[in-house]
Image: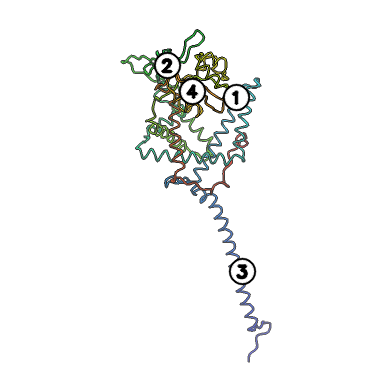
């Protein structure tokens, strides 16, 4: 048997096995370390992807199958906050102008406090819900426009975009003159049998539908020319660029601004379509009343009326309604919804000249006499209110319908930027 050379270490099988075991352990340790590091990187990467990619693609609401993404929703919140900050700044400048007026300054400070509270973290969920309502409404209106074939052409979008920045390349449009119904002091024989005209009392006049303010008289051979604008194309483009730079931190781009403006045009057109059948006239009642505190007093007034006493004189003597007691208790013309329900129900049921029994409302006891019923054209304000009520009812019904779903996967991530502090720096 040969022996190893002098100075050479002899490895036994036991020694070799230990070396192999240590090699395998190191290999396992390296692999485990790589796996742990890879897992950590994966977790961090997923967190970053979730925060900057996946989260923004989440759906916060659906409207009849169409999704509202979290990214667009949050950008709208940021832009809303930006607009609030601009309103705060302009209000603050107004305060500096009227600092010497204590009353006005107090009102302006109150407005500033209100805006600041809206921008506070405590208010962020309220703003977010308001913005989400607006986005849902916009999508509902867009879908309704598609269903009705209502569109906005590219040229119309550009025109609306230009107008939003005060740029009118073809000249500033001339305001449209509209005619309005006016009241004229004409009284029928039936009305004059009920009310008595005196030097100190003239009741509310009737209105004949044909009596309108004269419209502007224009020469049919002359086409009105728009007023020239001094706003140049370069100035317009500069203003747009400057504005887009200001709102960049909100995530808004020119495309988003154009989408907002298009949505406003669509809303206006859908509004007109929804409210096109709203009546421009309605039955109204002209009445007068005597208001007292107790039923006993009301019966006393009623007894004296039945004995032939003058209604206007009794109103001046007994009525607690100081706004009209010296006008014979005259309430003028009113529409459905103008009076409390108990009063209105009785008034609409009375014939001209008829006097009611005591009518109890939250204000006391009324003795009502109807002077006339008449179908009357609505004023522009009344017509606008009636149309708005119809549109709001339609939109609320659609918003609360089964086709609209909201999710609560966004509430812990609501953006609070921009802030007043960041904008003032």
Mark earlier in primary sequence (4, 3): 3
Quadrant of residue 319 in the image?
top right
Mark 4 vs mark 1: give the one in front.
4
Q: Nearer the viewer, residue 309 or 424?
A: 309
Q: Nearer the viewer, residue 175 or 388?
A: 388
For label 3, count other residues whose C-alpha is less than 10 Å away and answer few (under 14), some (14-19) or many (20+): few
Question: From mark 4 to mark 3, how far is it between C-alphas?
Answer: 99 Å
Question: From mark 2 to mark 4, how far is it between C-alphas?
Answer: 22 Å
Where is residue 106 shown, x and y percent of the image?
64, 25
Question: From mark 4 to mark 1, how far is it between C-alphas?
Answer: 54 Å
For label 4, count other residues whose C-alpha is less than 10 Å away and answer few (under 14), some (14-19) or many (20+): some
Mark 2 vs mark 1: give the one in front.
2
Q: Which disc number belongs to residue 94?
A: 1
Where is residue 7 shown, x and y percent of the image?
68, 82
**Do the residues bearing badges 2 and 1 touch, measured as CB atoms within 8 Å?**
no
Mark 2 highlights which residue?
Answer: 206
Mark earlier in primary sequence (2, 1): 1
Mark 2 vs mark 4: give the one in front.
4
Mark 3 highlights which residue?
Answer: 29
Task: Examine the rendering and report whether any part of residue 235 can be seen.
Answer: no
Question: From mark 2 to mark 1, how far is it between C-alphas?
Answer: 45 Å
Q: Nearer the viewer, residue 418 or 371?
A: 371
Mark 4 highlights which residue?
Answer: 356
- At x 61%, y 27%, the residue is 92
Residue at the extreme bottom of the image, as rendered? 1
Where is residue 11 shown, x and y percent of the image?
65, 82
Question: From mark 2 to mark 3, how far is it between C-alphas?
Answer: 99 Å
Side (left or right) of 179 relative to 37: left
Q: Secondary structure at mark 3?
A: helix
């Amino acid at each position: 048997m040969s022996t190893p050379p002098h100075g050479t270490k002899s490895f036994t099988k036991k020694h070799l096995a230990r070396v192999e075991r240590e090699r395998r352990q190191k290999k396992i340790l390296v692999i485990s370390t790589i796996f742990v590091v890879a897992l950590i990187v994966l977790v961090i990467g997923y967190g970053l992807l979730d925060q900057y990619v996946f989260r923004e693609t989440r759906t916060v609401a659906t409207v009849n199958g169409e999704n509202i993404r979290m990214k667009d929703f949050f950008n709208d919140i940021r832009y809303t906050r930006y607009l609030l900050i601009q309103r705060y700044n302009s209000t603050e400048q107004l305060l500096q102008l009227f600092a010497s007026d204590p009353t006005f300054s107090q009102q302006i400070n109150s407005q500033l406090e209100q805006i600041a509270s809206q921008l506070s973290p405590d208010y962020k969920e309220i703003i977010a819900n308001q913005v989400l309502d607006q986005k849902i409404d916009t999508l509902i209106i867009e879908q309704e426009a598609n269903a009705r074939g209502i569109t906005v052409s590219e040229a119309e979008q550009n025109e609306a975009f230009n107008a939003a920045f005060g740029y009118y390349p073809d000249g500033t449009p001339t305001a449209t003159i509209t005619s309005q119904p006016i009241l004229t002091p004409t009284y029928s024989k039936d009305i004059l049998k009920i009310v008595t005209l005196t030097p100190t009392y003239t009741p509310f006049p009737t209105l004949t539908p044909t009596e309108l303010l004269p419209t502007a008289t224009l020469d049919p051979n002359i086409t009105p020319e728009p007023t020239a604008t001094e706003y140049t194309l370069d100035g317009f483009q500069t203003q747009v660029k400057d504005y887009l730079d200001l709102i960049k931190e909100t995530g808004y781009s020119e495309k988003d601004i154009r989408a907002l403006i298009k949505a406003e045009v669509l809303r206006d057109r859908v509004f007109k379509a929804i409210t096109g059948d709203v009546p421009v006239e309605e039955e109204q009642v002209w009445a007068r009343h005597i208001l007292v505190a107790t039923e006993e007093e009301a019966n006393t007034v009623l007894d004296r009326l039945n004995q032939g006493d003058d209604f206007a004189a009794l109103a001046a003597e007994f009525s607690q309604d100081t706004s009209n007691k010296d006008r014979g208790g005259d309430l003028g013309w009113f529409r459905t919804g103008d009076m409390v329900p108990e009063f209105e129900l009785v008034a609409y049921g009375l014939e001209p000249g008829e006097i009611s029994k005591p009518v109890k409302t939250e204000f006391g006891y009324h003795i009502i006499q109807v002077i006339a019923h008449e179908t009357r054209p609505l004023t522009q304000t009344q017509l606008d209110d009636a149309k708005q009520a119809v549109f709001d009812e339609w939109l609320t019904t659609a918003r609360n319908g089964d086709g609209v779903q909201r999710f609560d996967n966004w509430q812990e991530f609501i953006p609070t930027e921009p802030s007043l502090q960041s904008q003032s720096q």
